[in-house]
Amino acid sequence: MEIKVLKNVMQKNSAIGNDNRDVFHQKGVYTINLTSSPGAGKTTLLENSLPELMKSLNIAIIEGDPYTTRDAERLAHLNLPTIQVNTEGGCHLDAQMISQAIGELDLDNIDLCVIENVGNLVCPAAFDLGETLRVMVYSITEGADKPKKYYNMFQGSHVILINKVELAELCNIDLEATYQEVREINPTCKIFQISATRPETLIEWNSWLAHTVKKAICQ
Ligand SMILES: Nc1nc2c(ncn2[C@@H]2O[C@H](COP(=O)(O)OP(=O)(O)OP(=O)(O)O)[C@@H](O)[C@H]2O)c(=O)[nH]1
Ligand SMILES: [Mg+2]
């Protein structure tokens, strides 16, 4: 008797993730998998970044949520193509869910597809969705000990947005030490320090992302 359930699930997810990546690539769509713990600021970031990014990119949103459409409703005024994926309590999106969502999008007219994952610092780190870039929002209000506790998520992210930095003093956080710990775990990721509620702190991130997407889709 052969029991390989977990391995099979992960292999299947990776295979579908690679298929998704091929589809995105063929259609010239750059994709972001946006991860964080619950409430770290993913939707707030989108509320305040997308209006700027929309000026030069055609954007679609895939919203992951255990049960509700609340985040999609917060972004509805932007009038972007949006697909809601409810995991029915599941703690992460997987590649099959994204494959289904892709079928609902007009990829020929999209430059950037933003996937907001379910808030969780463990499971989303293990499930490749076929994204180009994994972007993590790390809210300092969760505590300075999180990078080493949730090593895989920090280590596997291409970009880490250290968020809610205006609350550092209130939360007793040494921002420089936090930056250094993130850097130690992930020596190559891009790091931005932001307050997602304050659009003026997102200028550098917005311009880096717009530039990166345009460069990639023009190749
Ligand atoms: N003070 C402060 N509050 C913030 C900041 N960013 C987000 N918030 C607040 O944090 C709360 C949660 O933000 P969301 O954007 O909903 O977080 P999320 O990661 O999308 O949450 P889930 O989708 O439920 O995982 C909201 O009340 C935001 O206003 C920030 O930079 N500073
Ligand atoms: Mg959200």
Image (tube, helix red, strand yellow):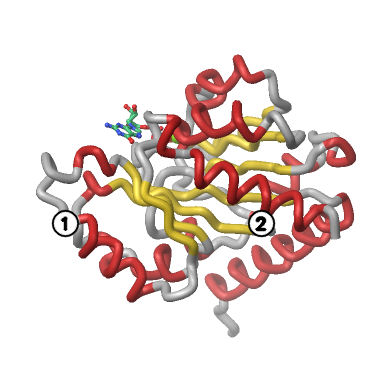
* Residue placed most toward the observer, 31 or 163: 163
Residue 174, which numbered label? 1
Q: Residue at x 67, y 54 (%)?
A: 212
Write the residue at 42% across / 51% down. 161
Label total for image: 2
Quadrant in the picture for the C terminus: bottom right
The residues bearing labels 1 and 2 have C-alpha atoms spaced at a distance of: 32 Å
Dot in front, 1 or 2: 1
Residue 150, image quadrant:
bottom left
Query: What's the residue at 51%, 65% (across, down)?
Result: 126
Q: Does the closest atom of ligand 1 sit within 8 Å of the Cβ of label 1?
A: no
Query: Which structural element holds mark 1?
Result: loop
Q: Where residue 160 sits in the image (x, y, percent)?
A: 44, 57
Q: Is residue 187 above or below residue 47?
A: below
Residue 176, position as x, y percentages in the image: 23, 61
Q: Which residue is mark 2?
A: 131
User: Could you tell me the amino acid type at mark 1?
Assistant: Asp
Q: Quadrant of residue 168?
A: top left
Residue found at the far bottom of this picture: 1
Residue 108 to residue 143: above or below: above
The residue nearer to you, when weighing 138 against 1, is: 138
Q: Residue at x 63, y 20 (%)?
A: 78
Q: Position of residue 87 (x, y in %)?
A: 54, 40
* Mark 2 element type: loop
Measuring from the top left, give residue 53's x and y in whole percent. Answer: 64, 35
- Residue type of the residue flagged with mark 2: Glu
